[in-house]
Amino acid sequence: MSTSRDEPPEERSGLRPRYRRAFGCLTWLYMGILVFLAANFLLVLPSRYLGSGALFGYLPPRLAFMGTLLILPGMALAAVLGARTYRTTRRRGTRVGAGVGALIGWSGFFGLEWLAIALGLNHRDQAFQTVVFPDLRGTLAFYAFVPLTLAATVLVIYALYSRRMDFERRRRLVLIGAALALLAGLAVVATDFDPLGDLGALISMVSAAVAGYVSGSGYARAGGDEMIPPGAQIRRREPRRKPR
């Protein structure tokens, strides 16, 4: 039975590389959430001085609430993803991050509005007094939204977390999931067209895509050189030279 005395000094000096990667991905998730909040605020800011200002009064608080709901499951998913995966190239990491972020922003926005309608939150919470898609309840799009979104979520999570799948198959699954999520949102828009809600969904998607790009950049770096997969064309960091 081995003890800590039998372990090499470098193994006792810190966390294992995969755990360092998990913490790194978690840190970059926080960065992404901050970027998401800043991006949607800056995109909506001009509407405060143009028109009625309804978009500015409605969207930033609603998306801040959505970010609060997503942070806990996001922390768990980011940590597990970091512990299960190797590093990737920056280009691939940012592209995948932006794509997944856009999906989260799109589906998350419509999902929050679906909950507000289903639970009647406009009668319970002042933050939901602004109602978008008010005539959605009871329609085919209302009942189809949940199964379509859940199917999309399962496909994307499976594509991200599976260890035995090549990149092309992962991409196909993500594209299928993206198509289902897009269909669910477009069905809501087509059933009850609401300019405020439609614009909010687009801003949420763009903001989350920017946040995903930032998080994807960190995902490609987290864990250091120890988490570069065998045979990958990723350049290792050169050791710093001590000044003479």
Image (cartoon, rainbow, N blue to C red):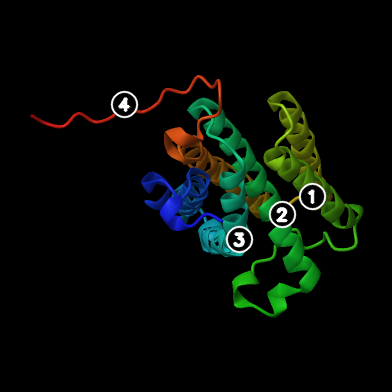
Task: Please report contact status of discs 1 and 2: CB closer than 8 Å, yes or no.
Answer: yes
Residue denoted by label 2: 110
Vertical arrangement, residue 238 with respect to residue 206, above or below? above
Q: What's under tag 3, amino acid-wise? A: Met
Marks 1 & 4, CB-CB < 8 Å contact: no
| Label 1 with label 3: CB-CB less than 8 Å | no
Q: CA distance from mark 4 to mark 3?
A: 41 Å
CA distance separating discs 4 and 2: 46 Å
* Secondary element type, mark 3: helix
Look at discs 1 and 2 and give the one toward the viewer. 1
Instruction: Please tell me whether mark 2 sits on a helix, a strand or a loop.
Output: helix
Q: Is residue 71 rendered to the left or right of residue 179?
A: left
Picture quarter with the N terminus:
bottom right
Label 1 SS: helix
Residue drawn at point x = 54 percent, y = 30 percent: 88
> Amino acid type of disc 1?
Thr
Of labels 1 and 3, earlier in sequence is: 3
Please give the residue where the numbered disc 3 appears in the rendered image: 66
- Local packing at callout 2 (Cα closer than 10 Å; few below 14, some 14-19, many 20+) is many
Question: Which dot marks residue 149?
Answer: 1
Q: Position of residue 27 (x, y in %)?
A: 46, 52
- Which residue corresponds to the image point at 71% horizontal and 54% vertical from the top-left? 110
Q: Earlier in the sequence, mark 4 or mark 3?
A: 3
N-term mark: 1 or 2: 2
Residue closest to the eye, 97 or 63: 97
The residue that label 4 is drawn on is 238
Quadrant of the frame with the C terminus = top left
